[in-house]
Image (spheres, grey):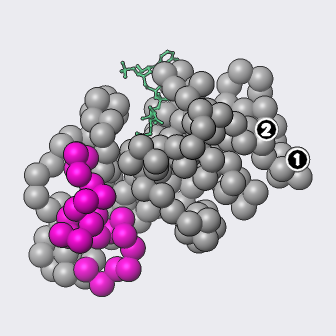
Amino acid sequence: MSRRTVRGVYRVPVTSQRQPADHGTPAIRRARTGDVRGIRALVAPLAERRVLVSKDAVAYFESLQEFRVAELDGRIVGCGALHVMWEDLAEIRTLAVAADQVGTGLGGRLLEELVQDARDIGVQRLFCLTFETGFFTRHGFEAIEGQAVPTDVYAELLRSYDEGVAEFLDLERVKPNTLGNTRMLRTL
Ligand SMILES: CC(=O)SCCNC(=O)CCNC(=O)[C@H](O)C(C)(C)COP(=O)(O)OP(=O)(O)OC[C@H]1O[C@@H](n2cnc3c(N)ncnc32)[C@H](O)[C@@H]1OP(=O)(O)O
Protein backbone atom coordinates (compact mmCIF):
# COMPACT_ATOMS: atom_id res chain seq x y z
CA MET A 1 0.00 0.00 0.00
CA SER A 2 1.40 3.42 -0.92
CA ARG A 3 2.06 6.36 1.42
CA ARG A 4 -0.70 8.14 -0.48
CA THR A 5 -3.19 5.77 1.08
CA VAL A 6 -1.42 5.88 4.47
CA ARG A 7 -2.43 9.53 4.63
CA GLY A 8 -6.02 8.40 4.36
CA VAL A 9 -6.92 10.84 1.59
CA TYR A 10 -10.26 9.63 0.38
CA ARG A 11 -12.99 11.98 -0.73
CA VAL A 12 -16.54 11.42 0.50
CA PRO A 13 -19.13 11.43 -2.30
CA VAL A 14 -20.57 14.96 -2.57
CA THR A 15 -24.11 13.67 -2.01
CA SER A 16 -23.22 12.54 1.53
CA GLN A 17 -21.73 15.88 2.61
CA ARG A 18 -24.81 17.19 4.37
CA GLN A 19 -22.83 18.95 7.09
CA PRO A 20 -19.40 19.90 5.74
CA ALA A 21 -16.68 20.14 8.37
CA ASP A 22 -15.21 23.53 9.28
CA HIS A 23 -11.84 24.23 7.74
CA GLY A 24 -9.09 23.13 10.09
CA THR A 25 -11.16 21.20 12.63
CA PRO A 26 -12.51 17.79 11.67
CA ALA A 27 -16.19 17.29 12.49
CA ILE A 28 -17.10 14.03 14.21
CA ARG A 29 -20.38 12.42 13.22
CA ARG A 30 -22.05 9.05 12.83
CA ALA A 31 -20.87 7.11 9.78
CA ARG A 32 -22.92 6.88 6.61
CA THR A 33 -22.83 4.22 3.92
CA GLY A 34 -20.84 6.54 1.63
CA ASP A 35 -18.04 6.66 4.21
CA VAL A 36 -17.10 2.98 3.96
CA ARG A 37 -14.56 3.49 1.19
CA GLY A 38 -12.96 6.29 3.20
CA ILE A 39 -12.86 4.15 6.34
CA ARG A 40 -11.27 1.30 4.39
CA ALA A 41 -8.68 3.65 2.92
CA LEU A 42 -7.75 4.76 6.43
CA VAL A 43 -7.57 1.23 7.80
CA ALA A 44 -5.84 -0.56 4.89
CA PRO A 45 -2.27 0.63 5.53
CA LEU A 46 -2.67 0.05 9.27
CA ALA A 47 -3.95 -3.47 8.57
CA GLU A 48 -0.91 -4.06 6.37
CA ARG A 49 1.27 -3.14 9.34
CA ARG A 50 -0.91 -5.45 11.48
CA VAL A 51 -1.89 -2.52 13.73
CA LEU A 52 -5.56 -3.07 12.85
CA VAL A 53 -7.33 -6.13 11.48
CA SER A 54 -8.25 -6.07 7.80
CA LYS A 55 -11.94 -6.57 7.03
CA ASP A 56 -14.01 -7.00 3.88
CA ALA A 57 -16.24 -4.12 2.76
CA VAL A 58 -19.33 -6.07 3.75
CA ALA A 59 -18.12 -6.20 7.35
CA TYR A 60 -17.97 -2.40 7.47
CA PHE A 61 -21.45 -2.04 5.99
CA GLU A 62 -22.81 -4.56 8.49
CA SER A 63 -21.22 -2.73 11.42
CA LEU A 64 -21.73 0.80 10.06
CA GLN A 65 -23.98 1.89 12.93
CA GLU A 66 -21.13 1.20 15.35
CA PHE A 67 -18.92 3.78 13.65
CA ARG A 68 -18.21 7.44 14.13
CA VAL A 69 -16.06 9.21 11.57
CA ALA A 70 -14.15 12.48 11.49
CA GLU A 71 -14.52 14.50 8.31
CA LEU A 72 -12.40 17.42 7.18
CA ASP A 73 -13.14 19.23 3.91
CA GLY A 74 -14.91 16.14 2.54
CA ARG A 75 -12.15 13.74 3.62
CA ILE A 76 -12.55 10.93 6.13
CA VAL A 77 -9.61 11.63 8.46
CA GLY A 78 -10.58 9.48 11.43
CA CYS A 79 -12.83 6.67 12.53
CA GLY A 80 -13.68 4.54 15.53
CA ALA A 81 -16.32 1.99 16.48
CA LEU A 82 -18.12 0.78 19.57
CA HIS A 83 -19.04 -2.90 19.55
CA VAL A 84 -21.36 -4.07 22.33
CA MET A 85 -20.45 -7.53 23.65
CA TRP A 86 -22.57 -7.95 26.76
CA GLU A 87 -24.94 -6.15 29.09
CA ASP A 88 -22.22 -4.11 30.79
CA LEU A 89 -19.41 -4.51 28.29
CA ALA A 90 -18.39 -3.09 24.90
CA GLU A 91 -15.20 -2.89 22.86
CA ILE A 92 -13.54 0.09 21.20
CA ARG A 93 -12.61 -1.01 17.69
CA THR A 94 -10.93 0.38 14.59
CA LEU A 95 -9.83 3.68 16.11
CA ALA A 96 -7.70 5.35 13.45
CA VAL A 97 -6.58 8.84 12.50
CA ALA A 98 -5.08 9.91 9.16
CA ALA A 99 -1.31 10.38 9.28
CA ASP A 100 -1.57 14.15 8.71
CA GLN A 101 -3.95 14.52 11.69
CA VAL A 102 -2.14 12.35 14.25
CA GLY A 103 -1.22 14.25 17.43
CA THR A 104 -3.85 16.97 16.98
CA GLY A 105 -6.23 15.60 19.60
CA LEU A 106 -8.52 13.95 17.05
CA GLY A 107 -7.97 10.39 18.31
CA GLY A 108 -8.83 11.54 21.81
CA ARG A 109 -11.98 13.31 20.60
CA LEU A 110 -13.14 10.25 18.66
CA LEU A 111 -12.49 7.98 21.63
CA GLU A 112 -14.38 10.23 24.06
CA GLU A 113 -17.37 10.40 21.65
CA LEU A 114 -17.46 6.61 21.65
CA VAL A 115 -17.18 6.59 25.44
CA GLN A 116 -20.20 8.89 25.62
CA ASP A 117 -22.09 6.62 23.19
CA ALA A 118 -21.24 3.71 25.48
CA ARG A 119 -22.53 5.55 28.56
CA ASP A 120 -25.71 6.55 26.72
CA ILE A 121 -26.63 2.93 26.03
CA GLY A 122 -25.82 1.56 29.48
CA VAL A 123 -22.32 0.15 28.98
CA GLN A 124 -20.22 0.22 32.16
CA ARG A 125 -16.91 -1.25 30.98
CA LEU A 126 -14.94 -0.69 27.80
CA PHE A 127 -12.41 -3.18 26.48
CA CYS A 128 -9.71 -2.59 23.88
CA LEU A 129 -6.87 -4.57 22.39
CA THR A 130 -4.04 -2.29 21.31
CA PHE A 131 -0.40 -1.42 20.77
CA GLU A 132 -1.21 2.19 21.77
CA THR A 133 -1.05 1.60 25.52
CA GLY A 134 0.11 5.16 26.33
CA PHE A 135 -2.80 6.75 24.48
CA PHE A 136 -5.41 4.46 26.04
CA THR A 137 -3.87 4.78 29.53
CA ARG A 138 -4.18 8.55 29.24
CA HIS A 139 -7.86 7.96 28.51
CA GLY A 140 -8.47 5.91 31.65
CA PHE A 141 -7.81 2.37 30.39
CA GLU A 142 -5.75 -0.10 32.44
CA ALA A 143 -3.96 -3.21 31.25
CA ILE A 144 -5.62 -6.42 32.38
CA GLU A 145 -4.46 -10.01 32.71
CA GLY A 146 -6.80 -12.92 32.17
CA GLN A 147 -10.49 -12.77 31.46
CA ALA A 148 -12.71 -9.74 32.02
CA VAL A 149 -15.98 -11.67 32.35
CA PRO A 150 -17.20 -14.43 34.68
CA THR A 151 -17.23 -18.01 33.39
CA ASP A 152 -20.98 -18.06 32.63
CA VAL A 153 -20.68 -14.96 30.41
CA TYR A 154 -17.49 -16.39 28.85
CA ALA A 155 -19.48 -19.49 27.87
CA GLU A 156 -22.21 -17.35 26.29
CA LEU A 157 -19.67 -15.25 24.39
CA LEU A 158 -18.16 -18.44 22.93
CA ARG A 159 -21.35 -18.69 20.86
CA SER A 160 -20.46 -15.50 18.96
CA TYR A 161 -19.26 -15.73 15.35
CA ASP A 162 -17.49 -12.39 15.67
CA GLU A 163 -13.69 -12.59 15.31
CA GLY A 164 -13.24 -9.65 17.67
CA VAL A 165 -15.12 -11.49 20.38
CA ALA A 166 -12.84 -14.49 19.80
CA GLU A 167 -9.90 -12.12 20.33
CA PHE A 168 -11.51 -10.75 23.50
CA LEU A 169 -11.86 -14.34 24.74
CA ASP A 170 -8.20 -14.88 23.79
CA LEU A 171 -8.99 -18.07 21.88
CA GLU A 172 -5.98 -20.04 20.64
CA ARG A 173 -6.97 -19.81 16.96
CA VAL A 174 -6.86 -15.97 16.94
CA LYS A 175 -3.69 -15.52 19.02
CA PRO A 176 -1.57 -14.86 15.90
CA ASN A 177 -3.80 -11.78 15.22
CA THR A 178 -3.30 -10.32 18.67
CA LEU A 179 0.40 -10.97 19.19
CA GLY A 180 2.04 -8.06 21.03
CA ASN A 181 -1.25 -6.29 21.74
CA THR A 182 -2.23 -5.31 25.28
CA ARG A 183 -5.66 -6.11 26.70
CA MET A 184 -7.05 -3.00 28.39
CA LEU A 185 -10.21 -2.08 30.24
CA ARG A 186 -11.82 1.21 31.32
CA THR A 187 -14.59 1.39 33.90
CA LEU A 188 -17.08 4.16 33.05
C1 LIG B 1 -8.92 -0.40 20.03
C2 LIG B 1 -8.18 0.03 18.82
O1 LIG B 1 -8.77 0.47 17.87
S1 LIG B 1 -6.52 -0.13 18.91
C3 LIG B 1 -5.88 0.69 17.51
C4 LIG B 1 -5.53 2.10 17.78
N1 LIG B 1 -5.21 2.70 16.51
C5 LIG B 1 -3.99 2.60 15.96
O2 LIG B 1 -3.04 2.09 16.52
C6 LIG B 1 -3.90 3.17 14.56
C7 LIG B 1 -2.71 4.09 14.39
N2 LIG B 1 -2.76 5.18 15.33
C8 LIG B 1 -3.62 6.22 15.22
O3 LIG B 1 -4.47 6.26 14.33
C9 LIG B 1 -3.53 7.32 16.26
O4 LIG B 1 -2.19 7.45 16.65
C10 LIG B 1 -4.40 7.09 17.51
C11 LIG B 1 -5.84 6.83 17.10
C12 LIG B 1 -3.90 5.93 18.35
C13 LIG B 1 -4.32 8.34 18.36
O5 LIG B 1 -4.81 9.42 17.59
P1 LIG B 1 -4.26 10.90 17.77
O6 LIG B 1 -5.14 11.78 16.99
O7 LIG B 1 -2.81 10.96 17.48
O8 LIG B 1 -4.50 11.10 19.32
P2 LIG B 1 -4.39 12.45 20.13
O9 LIG B 1 -3.88 13.55 19.27
O10 LIG B 1 -5.69 12.65 20.82
O11 LIG B 1 -3.33 12.08 21.22
C14 LIG B 1 -2.03 11.78 20.81
C15 LIG B 1 -1.05 12.80 21.32
O12 LIG B 1 -1.35 14.11 20.86
C16 LIG B 1 -1.40 15.02 21.97
N3 LIG B 1 -2.40 16.05 21.69
C17 LIG B 1 -3.70 15.98 22.00
N4 LIG B 1 -4.31 17.11 21.59
C18 LIG B 1 -3.39 17.86 21.00
C19 LIG B 1 -3.41 19.12 20.35
N5 LIG B 1 -4.53 19.82 20.25
N6 LIG B 1 -2.26 19.58 19.82
C20 LIG B 1 -1.12 18.87 19.93
N7 LIG B 1 -1.04 17.68 20.53
C21 LIG B 1 -2.16 17.18 21.05
C22 LIG B 1 -1.82 14.18 23.12
O13 LIG B 1 -1.39 14.75 24.35
C23 LIG B 1 -1.08 12.93 22.81
O14 LIG B 1 0.25 13.10 23.18
P3 LIG B 1 0.97 12.01 24.01
O15 LIG B 1 0.77 10.73 23.21
O16 LIG B 1 2.37 12.44 24.11
O17 LIG B 1 0.20 12.03 25.30
Residue 31 placed where, x, y %?
66, 54
Q: Could you tell me residue 142's position as x and y percent?
A: 20, 41
Q: Give the range drawn in magenta.
A: 158-184
| Residue type, mark 2 in image | Gly
Which residue bears the numbered disc 1?
14
Front in this rendered view, residue 179 or 61: 179
Quadrant position of residue 151: bottom left
Q: Mark 2 points at which residue?
A: 74
Amino acid under label 1? Val
CB under 8 Å between discs 1 and 2: yes
Instruction: State the residue at coordinates (46%, 39%).
Output: 112
For the point 36% across and 60% down, which residue is it?
Answer: 90
Residue at screen point 10% across, 58% down: 146
SS for dot 2:
loop
Mark 1: few/some/many CA within 10 Å (<14, 14-19, 20+) = few
Quick check: which quadrant has ligand 1? top left
Q: Which residue is drawn at 13% across and 70% down?
A: 150
Q: Is residue 24 above or below residue 181?
A: above
Residue 41 vs residue 113, the one in the foreground = 41
Horizontal side of residue 92 vs 117, given as left or right: left
**Residue 15 visible in the current orientation:** yes
Q: Point out the residue furthest to the front here.
A: 2
Q: Is residue 7 above or below residue 34?
A: above
